[in-house]
Image (cartoon, rainbow, N blue to C red):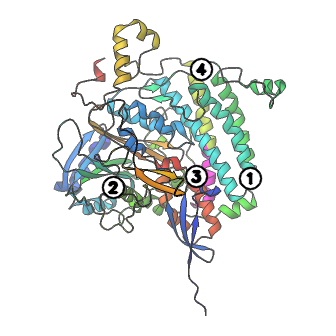
Amino acid sequence: MSAKLEVLSQNLQKHLGDRIGSLQVALDEITVDIDVADYLGVMTILRDEPELRFEELIDLCGVDYSAYGNSEWFGKRFAAVSHLISITNNWRLRVRCFAAEDDFPSIPSLVPIWNSVNWFEREAFDLYGIVFPGHPDLRRILTDYGFIGYPFRKDFPIYGYVEMRYDPDQQRVIYQPVTIEPREVTPRIVREASYGDVGNV
Amino acid sequence: MSDIQNYTLNFGPQHPAAHGVLRMVLELDGEVVMRADPHIGMLHRATEKLAETKTWVQSVPYMDRLDYMSMMSSEHAYCLAIEKLLGIDVPIRAQYIRVMFDEITRVLNHLLWIGAHGIDVGAMTMMLYAMREREDLVDCYEAVSGSRWHAAYYRPGGVYRDLPDSMPKYKASKWKSAAQVNKLNEVRSGTLLDFLDDFVARFPKIVDEYETLLTDNRIWKQRLVNVGIVTPERAMQLGFTGPMLRGSGIAWDLRKKQPYAVYDRVDFDIPVGVTGDCYDRYLVRVEEMRQANRIIKQCIDWLRVNPGPVITNNHKVAAPPRASMKSNMEELIHHFKLCTEGIHVPEGQVYSAIEHPKGEFGIYAVSDGANKPYRLKIRSPGYVHLSAMNELTHGHMIADVVTMIGTIDIVFGEIDR
């Protein structure tokens, strides 16, 4: 761990204490897991505390862990992962917050803390169905008007359920069930950890 | 007094100034914009979901199609993410080639931007000039990758091949006589580096030419100065990066602050704006073109004297050379495994960001140890900048909406993904 990351992780421990669910350091990046109950409080400290001072929220995205790895996933299913950056201190942080319920995932909105998160939360809502209470305008953003379902969830097929075409009889664009066959060129394979270990060459 | 109400105006998605497929619902009070609500997603292709169904290498060409005006930059971020997860080193020559093409891409992007922004605001000529110079630079793309736009030239572990010794040449046709073709091919007779050297020498004069057309132009200044002012505090709050942030006076550039590739070995300056209006962002981008030119020159000089490998010799990541694959059993196996199954990336998560011409372009990749990404999130700068549209246009005249679209430098490939 570089000296800079060392300082950041100490500052995090100092100001957040036991509110950090877990702190992992890997590949020169720090990831902290935050419980959904502490989420807003922790994020406000991260922004305002001079020893942390994350002025910008760079990114927030949803992740669906239900198909992770080879074995069954027993943890919580949906998470919102945000990437913060401090312009003053020049460091980055990844914050992960799992939604408490899988059936109705809900994570507090960060819009009052960082305005830039607005569309990211709309996107996570649109693609994963994660609800962000406190968001001023939680509408779908990327999918079509009137779209049904959450397309980036792992149980949503890559080909979708409906396709769109022009119907010459009705003289308008219509939706119909998909007619293409699912096809996978390269199967997805999870090998044991040492397989393809590039360090061995 | 009669009751005057605000009215709503639909802008786009098929509008020449919408830079693609932007639809905006504008609420107007007379000619003043009270609220702008961009509707995006008309170009949504679910790139991130598609990437989950493809092997790691197969998604490299998707990156070109994100921001189709600065193709190789997006590839760079994606390759960096994979390399970081794998923990492999990239040969130094490949890093110089990447930096050189990143900067060529920056010039390409800013040229299109200055042309499109010019047309939006009423300076027709800029587009024609900018396209003339872009032609030379896409020729460089063509020389290294065979493709003028969607290069797929960067690969995990390096770049696909070394710089070529010859440039593509014009052929005589019914539109171009033999004499014209000979004149055009004169600079194309040497290697790619010779051609670029010639371009780099010409380019500062060309930027001067652009500036004589725009910088002190009365109409240009009337349309840009004090339009769309963003204070540094608001710029950070709104998540601005790249020229949008620097235009507001914050000297933040990932190439300097968190250097990747060989940016710590080249010499360049970061231009910063003062007032944070559209005119400052214009000045910042013009200066960035000059600085990019400087970096390209330094890379050319280095690449001329330092031959070497351009892709890792770790054949679990990059395919072995054709000749050794045909003669060596081990290499044949590597080749077969790479082509049928792809790279296995160790479990973990990584965020790699680069200074894309439009701002910070990031790739957040989660791997569960499979031959495909588990989750790939593309953080595109245009998406965040466009989300500030409401705040930028509030209280401005309706004609300034177009200026604002221009100053954000929108490309829908990366916003909709």
Disc with the residue nearer the chain's start (4 vs 1): 1
Question: Which marked residue is nearer to the observer: mark 2 or mark 3?
Answer: 2
| B98 lies above or below B323 | below
Q: Position of residue B151 (x, y in %)?
A: 54, 32
Disc sitting over residue B20 in the figure: 3
Mark 1 element type: helix
- As drawn, the residue found furthest toward the top would be B327
Between A178 and B224, the one lying in front of the other is A178
Disc with the residue nearer the chain's start (1 vs 3): 3
Residue at point 64% right, 41% down?
B290
Q: Which residue is mark 2?
A: A149
How far apart in space, not on screen, are marks 3 and 4 (Cα)?
34 Å
**Quadrant of the rendering where the N terminus of chain B is positioned:** bottom right
Give the chain of mark 1. B
Check disc 3 and give the amino acid type: Gly
For residue A124, which quarter of the picture?
Answer: bottom left
Q: Is residue B352 left or right of residue B390?
A: left
How far apart in space, not on screen, are marks 1 and 3 (Cα)?
18 Å
Mark 4 element type: loop
Label 4 close to label 1 by CB (< 8 Å): no
Judge if badges 4 and 1 mark residues of a common chain: yes
Residue B21 can be seen, yes or no: yes
Magenta region, main secondary structure:
helix
How far apart in space, not on screen, are marks 4 and 2 (Cα)?
49 Å
- As drawn, the residue found furthest toward the front would be A169
| A70 lies above or below B216 | above
